[in-house]
Amino acid sequence: MTTVIENINSYFLDMYGRYENIDEEVRNMVKSFYDPKVEERGIEKGKIEVARNLLKMGMDLLAIMQATGLTKEEIEKIKENMN
């Protein structure tokens, strides 16, 4: 992925000032990199990490549910996996 970004950056640096629609091309390229499923997985991992940290702090189940949006069952499963 790093190589792809470096190549795109190089392309834009070469084309800057010579291409009228570069802003539109940048927007289209960035949109093509966005994957909502990847974002969802990242959000879910974040919720799990927050729940794990709150469990370590001794926070009660209801508060963790409210803070993360996770279900009681999901939090209990995280708690089981911590032991």
Image: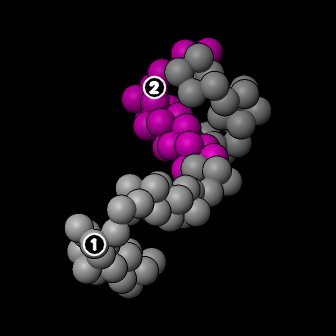
**Residue 9 in view here:** no
Among the 4 quarters of the image, the one containing residue 62: top right
Q: Which residue is mark 2?
A: 58
Check disc 1 and give the amino acid type: Arg
Taking depth in this image into account, of 50 and 20 the one nearest to the observer is: 20
Question: What segment carries the magenta color?
Answer: 40-63
Q: Which residue is located at x 72 percent, y 28 percent? A: 71
Q: Label 2, label 1: how many angstroms apart (C-alpha)? A: 59 Å
Q: Which mark is residue 55?
A: none
Question: In screen coordinates, is 1 left or right of 51?
Answer: left
The reply to whether callout 2 and callout 1 are in contact (CB within 8 Å) is no
* Secondary structure type for disc 1: loop
Vertical side of 56 occupied by 66: above or below: above
Check disc 2 and give the amino acid type: Gly
Q: Which residue is mark 1?
A: 18
Residue 81 on image: x %, y %? 63, 51
Q: Which residue is located at x 37 percent, y 76 percent? A: 8
Question: In screen coordinates, is 25 left or right of 81?
Answer: left
The stretch drawn in magenta includes residue 52: yes
| Mark toward the start of the polypeptide (2 vs 1) | 1
Among the 4 quarters of the image, the one containing residue 3: bottom left
Vertical side of 74 occupied by 22: above or below: below
Taking depth in this image into account, of 5 and 58 the one nearest to the observer is: 5
Q: Which residue is located at x 62 percent, y 57 percent? A: 35
Residue 9 on image: x %, y %? 30, 74
Residue 60 on image: x %, y %? 54, 18
Vertical side of 35 occupied by 49: above or below: above
